[in-house]
Image (cartoon, rainbow, N blue to C red):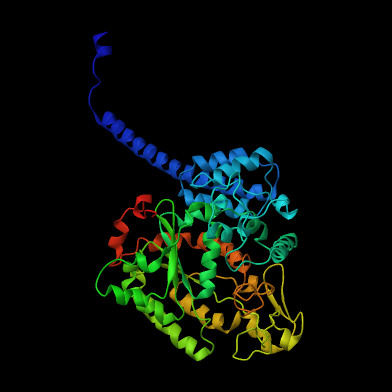
Amino acid sequence: MKRLLARPARGPQSRWSRQTLLRLLFVATAAVVLAFIGWALADTAKIDNIVRVQVESDAVDYGQLANVLLANDTFPSDSLLSQLESYVIPNRKLRGDDWDQMNSLLNSSCPVKYNRLRYPDVRRFKQKPYLLGGARQPECINCKQEGVWPNVCQYISNGPVCPKKDQQHFWRYLVSQAEDGAPGYEAMLTMTPCDIWPYFRGRTVWIAGDSISQEFMRGLQCFMMEFWDMTVHDIRGEILDGPELEDMRERVLGGWCVYLPEGTRLCHLRINFPGEIVRLLPDYQRLTMKHSDIVILNVGLWLNDVETYNNEMQEFVSYYREHRADLPFFLWRDSSVQHFNTPVGNFFVDPVSWDCLPLGTLLGGVGAIQVDNDNKIHRNGPEELELIVEGGWRNKAARPMMEQLGIPLIETWNQTLPVFRYHHHYHENPEHSDCSHWCHPSPYQMWIYDTVLALRQTLPQVEAHNTMPGKFNFLNTVASEASEYEID
């Protein structure tokens, strides 16, 4: 009995057993690590598969989809929402409780809750799209307020507002595009401000440019009307104190900001020529601009010859190339279509007439330029119209510059090209049509959707840019909390 209970003798066999145990422990640990990695990849693949399948089928368990997405922590929440939106929103296959559950999921990170509109109701003109001034559901707060901006942002009065009949015509135009299968139009008609919020949260988004950018800013802040208090702040009053303050204010042509939740702002910075922003960027922190901000820039409509345009643009290209790491993240909105009665729609001192016409009409007649349901331009007229297919001479010049700099594009030209009817009611004289500006709502609102697409596609670049070393990165150490930008 004692021998049976005695400790086994030490020897080569027992040492071999310990080595075996160590090997087994190592193998088991590696297996656990690989299993964890495999589980993460499998879960990601599962998500991707579930979401993709839901695009093709009405029989998917949307509750399962929502639960998997909410439980998964493989990707940042913004990326998950982006992935979900990119599949679910353009493919309207949600019904009843499934729709409500998915709507709740998409609202989960949004400080203002919106009921997502159902496309059949929009198509039958029972629910007005938020992009076109529709009141927030289930309840709109700011649309009940008195003052200029509540009327402007519902496209009622007090601004360059399209007449009601033209607003209805534009709504019908967007629905017709969706019914013809043109990509993005269903999503555009049913999108909510919560779709763009993940890309704006905690930073300032700067809409920099001329009067076209100014109107784009109006459209954007009106789309977000429930996020701010209907008070605008002159950008000159935002400039931080420092040397030559008055000189700095003189360099700023104009602009304004609106304050949104969680330390977020929308700001317009008036820039008419490329050189003007180059002269402001060395002191951009004085504008309360940060490295983590986003700047959506377009300039050039004030320049009407190729040589001057290229020379001015090269000034910006050279500065940006040298200082990119120190600057905020830039996107370039392409130059917008003009519909003057000239060979390719551009403004000249003496256009043939001040009537705004479809591009190509003067040289090739009606229908010389067509945009198909895939947003591709086709030329059915003389070779001179090829410049329209190429996006106009400004975009033809600027696109390779932006690609060289790695600046993403917000592409609006093709989509906006057919929309020539709303170049009125911009000026005090409603009969004055300048064929560059539109009344609201119009292409400016379409560009909001284009901006969402561009930001969704460039989210990894934005995140990578925020980690780039730069001499102004100390600004990023300031917490982006709601208290940072207090509303007056």
Judge whether 249 appears above or below 36 on screen. below
Judge whether 283 appears above or below 456 on screen. below
Please indicate whether residue 382 sits to the left or right of residue 140 in the image: right
Quadrant showing the C terminus: bottom left
Which residue is rendered at x = 27% and y = 28% of the image? Answer: 14
Q: Quadrant of residue 426?
A: bottom right
**Total number of numbered discs in the rendering:** 0
Instruction: State the residue lying farthest toward the top.
Output: 1
Q: Quadrant of residue 349?
A: bottom right
Residue 82 seen from this side: no
Where is residue 237? Give x, y as percent: 36, 66
Please indicate whether residue 323 sits to the left or right of residue 86 in the image: left
Where is residue 247? Give x, y as percent: 31, 77
Where is residue 447? Give x, y as percent: 58, 66
Judge whether 203 appears above or below 98 on screen. below
Q: Depth check: 351 or 2 in front? A: 351
Residue 461 seen from this side: yes
Which residue is rendered at x = 59% and y = 38% of the image? Answer: 64
Instruction: State the residue lying farthest toward the front.
Output: 146
Where is residue 214? Give x, y as percent: 51, 70
Which residue is rendered at x = 44% and y = 41% of the image? Answer: 36
Quadrant showing the N terminus: top left
Q: Depth check: 317 or 29 in front? A: 317
Q: Depth check: 411 or 350 in front? A: 350
